[in-house]
Image (cartoon, rainbow, N blue to C red):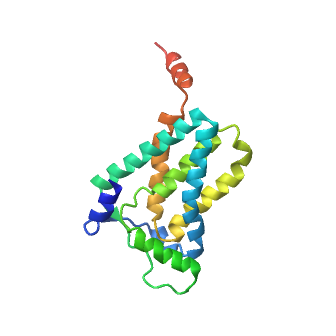
Amino acid sequence: WFNYLEEHVQKNYFVIHSPLDDFIPFVEYFIIPYYFWFIFMGICVFYFFFTDKKGFYRITTFLIVGMTAFLIICTVFPNGLNLRPTVFTRDNFCVDLVRRLYTLDTPTNVLPSIHVFNTVGVLIAAAHSEKLRAHMWSIFITGFLIILSTVFLKQHSVTDVIAAFAMACIIYPFIYASQPRKATKFSHQPI
Protein backbone atom coordinates (compact mmCIF):
# COMPACT_ATOMS: atom_id res chain seq x y z
CA TRP A 1 0.00 0.00 0.00
CA PHE A 2 2.79 2.40 0.99
CA ASN A 3 4.80 1.48 -2.11
CA TYR A 4 1.72 2.12 -4.26
CA LEU A 5 1.34 5.58 -2.69
CA GLU A 6 5.04 6.32 -3.16
CA GLU A 7 4.81 5.45 -6.86
CA HIS A 8 1.50 7.16 -7.62
CA VAL A 9 1.45 10.27 -5.44
CA GLN A 10 4.01 12.37 -7.27
CA LYS A 11 2.20 15.38 -8.73
CA ASN A 12 -1.25 16.26 -7.46
CA TYR A 13 -0.81 16.47 -3.73
CA PHE A 14 -1.43 19.01 -1.00
CA VAL A 15 1.85 20.71 -0.04
CA ILE A 16 2.47 20.60 3.69
CA HIS A 17 4.23 23.65 5.05
CA SER A 18 4.49 25.53 8.32
CA PRO A 19 6.01 29.00 8.69
CA LEU A 20 8.28 27.45 11.34
CA ASP A 21 9.84 25.26 8.64
CA ASP A 22 11.48 28.36 7.17
CA PHE A 23 13.40 28.98 10.41
CA ILE A 24 14.75 25.44 10.75
CA PRO A 25 18.10 25.03 9.03
CA PHE A 26 19.14 21.97 7.09
CA VAL A 27 21.65 20.04 9.22
CA GLU A 28 23.04 16.95 7.51
CA TYR A 29 24.44 15.47 10.74
CA PHE A 30 20.90 14.59 11.80
CA ILE A 31 21.07 11.78 9.24
CA ILE A 32 22.69 9.69 11.97
CA PRO A 33 19.71 9.70 14.37
CA TYR A 34 17.37 9.53 11.37
CA TYR A 35 18.90 6.25 10.18
CA PHE A 36 19.37 5.05 13.76
CA TRP A 37 15.56 5.04 13.99
CA PHE A 38 15.48 1.70 12.15
CA ILE A 39 17.76 0.09 14.75
CA PHE A 40 15.95 1.86 17.60
CA MET A 41 12.59 0.52 16.49
CA GLY A 42 13.90 -3.02 16.01
CA ILE A 43 15.63 -3.11 19.39
CA CYS A 44 12.55 -1.80 21.20
CA VAL A 45 10.05 -4.12 19.54
CA PHE A 46 12.31 -7.15 20.03
CA TYR A 47 12.95 -6.14 23.64
CA PHE A 48 9.23 -6.27 24.35
CA PHE A 49 8.85 -9.48 22.35
CA PHE A 50 11.38 -11.27 24.53
CA THR A 51 10.68 -9.65 27.92
CA ASP A 52 7.11 -8.38 28.17
CA LYS A 53 4.28 -10.12 26.32
CA LYS A 54 1.62 -7.56 27.29
CA GLY A 55 3.96 -4.68 26.41
CA PHE A 56 4.76 -6.32 23.07
CA TYR A 57 1.09 -6.60 22.13
CA ARG A 58 0.46 -3.02 23.18
CA ILE A 59 3.36 -1.50 21.25
CA THR A 60 2.70 -3.53 18.11
CA THR A 61 -1.01 -2.72 18.23
CA PHE A 62 -0.19 0.96 18.68
CA LEU A 63 2.24 0.91 15.75
CA ILE A 64 -0.05 -1.09 13.45
CA VAL A 65 -3.09 1.09 14.16
CA GLY A 66 -1.06 4.27 13.61
CA MET A 67 0.59 3.11 10.41
CA THR A 68 -2.76 1.94 9.04
CA ALA A 69 -4.30 5.32 9.89
CA PHE A 70 -1.32 6.96 8.14
CA LEU A 71 -1.97 4.95 4.97
CA ILE A 72 -5.65 5.86 5.01
CA ILE A 73 -4.84 9.56 5.53
CA CYS A 74 -2.31 9.58 2.67
CA THR A 75 -4.75 7.76 0.38
CA VAL A 76 -7.63 10.15 1.07
CA PHE A 77 -5.44 13.26 1.45
CA PRO A 78 -2.37 12.93 -0.82
CA ASN A 79 0.34 15.12 0.61
CA GLY A 80 3.98 16.05 0.22
CA LEU A 81 6.47 18.80 0.80
CA ASN A 82 8.86 21.09 -0.98
CA LEU A 83 11.41 21.65 1.77
CA ARG A 84 14.38 19.64 0.57
CA PRO A 85 17.46 21.59 -0.46
CA THR A 86 18.36 21.33 -4.12
CA VAL A 87 21.98 22.38 -3.55
CA PHE A 88 24.18 21.38 -0.63
CA THR A 89 26.65 23.95 0.66
CA ARG A 90 28.90 21.25 2.13
CA ASP A 91 30.13 17.95 0.83
CA ASN A 92 30.78 15.23 3.38
CA PHE A 93 29.79 11.70 4.35
CA CYS A 94 26.54 12.84 5.99
CA VAL A 95 25.52 14.84 2.92
CA ASP A 96 26.16 11.73 0.83
CA LEU A 97 23.85 9.78 3.14
CA VAL A 98 21.18 12.48 2.82
CA ARG A 99 21.45 12.39 -0.98
CA ARG A 100 20.98 8.62 -0.81
CA LEU A 101 17.94 9.04 1.45
CA TYR A 102 16.41 11.57 -0.93
CA THR A 103 16.77 9.15 -3.86
CA LEU A 104 15.17 6.30 -1.90
CA ASP A 105 12.34 8.22 -0.22
CA THR A 106 10.08 10.59 -2.12
CA PRO A 107 8.99 13.87 -0.47
CA THR A 108 5.38 12.63 -0.51
CA ASN A 109 3.15 10.83 2.00
CA VAL A 110 4.57 12.77 4.91
CA LEU A 111 1.56 13.66 7.05
CA PRO A 112 1.62 12.45 9.77
CA SER A 113 5.26 11.51 10.16
CA ILE A 114 5.63 7.78 10.72
CA HIS A 115 9.17 8.34 12.00
CA VAL A 116 7.75 10.58 14.71
CA PHE A 117 4.62 8.53 15.43
CA ASN A 118 6.55 5.28 15.87
CA THR A 119 9.17 7.02 18.02
CA VAL A 120 6.42 8.39 20.26
CA GLY A 121 5.00 4.84 20.41
CA VAL A 122 8.33 3.53 21.70
CA LEU A 123 8.55 6.32 24.27
CA ILE A 124 5.05 5.50 25.50
CA ALA A 125 5.81 1.77 25.67
CA ALA A 126 9.04 2.43 27.56
CA ALA A 127 7.22 4.71 30.01
CA HIS A 128 4.75 1.89 30.71
CA SER A 129 7.53 -0.64 31.31
CA GLU A 130 8.74 -1.08 34.89
CA LYS A 131 12.07 -2.47 33.63
CA LEU A 132 12.75 0.40 31.22
CA ARG A 133 11.92 3.27 33.56
CA ALA A 134 15.52 3.30 34.79
CA HIS A 135 16.65 3.94 31.20
CA MET A 136 14.00 6.53 30.29
CA TRP A 137 16.45 9.41 29.95
CA SER A 138 18.56 7.65 27.33
CA ILE A 139 15.45 6.41 25.50
CA PHE A 140 13.89 9.88 25.64
CA ILE A 141 17.05 11.62 24.37
CA THR A 142 17.35 9.11 21.51
CA GLY A 143 13.69 9.60 20.61
CA PHE A 144 14.01 13.38 20.84
CA LEU A 145 17.00 13.38 18.46
CA ILE A 146 15.12 11.14 16.02
CA ILE A 147 12.13 13.48 16.05
CA LEU A 148 14.38 16.52 15.54
CA SER A 149 16.13 14.74 12.67
CA THR A 150 12.93 14.64 10.63
CA VAL A 151 12.71 18.44 10.45
CA PHE A 152 16.44 19.24 10.31
CA LEU A 153 16.83 16.91 7.31
CA LYS A 154 13.80 18.53 5.67
CA GLN A 155 12.11 15.14 5.49
CA HIS A 156 9.10 16.49 7.36
CA SER A 157 7.39 19.74 8.17
CA VAL A 158 6.66 20.82 11.72
CA THR A 159 3.03 20.17 10.73
CA ASP A 160 3.83 16.48 10.13
CA VAL A 161 5.41 16.25 13.58
CA ILE A 162 2.39 17.86 15.26
CA ALA A 163 0.04 15.57 13.34
CA ALA A 164 2.03 12.52 14.49
CA PHE A 165 1.77 13.62 18.13
CA ALA A 166 -1.96 14.31 17.68
CA MET A 167 -2.51 10.85 16.18
CA ALA A 168 -0.57 9.29 19.07
CA CYS A 169 -2.76 11.17 21.57
CA ILE A 170 -5.90 9.89 19.86
CA ILE A 171 -4.74 6.26 19.71
CA TYR A 172 -3.08 6.14 23.14
CA PRO A 173 -6.21 5.75 25.32
CA PHE A 174 -7.50 2.86 23.23
CA ILE A 175 -4.27 0.86 23.63
CA TYR A 176 -2.84 1.89 26.99
CA ALA A 177 -5.84 2.76 29.18
CA SER A 178 -6.37 -0.25 31.38
CA GLN A 179 -9.70 -2.07 31.25
CA PRO A 180 -10.29 -2.03 35.03
CA ARG A 181 -9.80 1.74 35.11
CA LYS A 182 -12.34 2.18 32.29
CA ALA A 183 -14.83 -0.08 34.05
CA THR A 184 -14.31 1.66 37.41
CA LYS A 185 -14.87 5.13 35.98
CA PHE A 186 -18.00 3.97 34.17
CA SER A 187 -19.39 2.16 37.22
CA HIS A 188 -19.15 5.30 39.39
CA GLN A 189 -21.28 7.43 37.09
CA PRO A 190 -24.45 8.81 38.69
CA ILE A 191 -27.63 7.02 37.76
Q: Residue at x 69, y 43 (%)?
A: 132
Determine if residue 128 is in view: no
| Mark count | 0
Q: Nearer the viewer, residue 172 or 19?
A: 172
Q: Position of residue 82 (x, y in %)?
A: 38, 73
Q: Residue at x 53, y 22 (%)?
A: 185
* Residue 80 appears left or right of 41: left
* Residue 31 appears left or right of 135: left
Q: Residue at x 60, y 48 (%)?
A: 44
Q: Position of residue 25 (x, y in %)?
A: 54, 76
Determine if residue 146 is in view: yes
Residue at the far right in the pictured view: 134
Question: Image height check: is 43 above or below 110?
Answer: above
Q: Position of residue 2 (x, y in %)?
A: 35, 56
| Quarter-of-image position of residue 105 | bottom left
| Quarter-of-image position of residue 55 | top right
Question: Image height check: is 96 above or below 69?
Answer: below
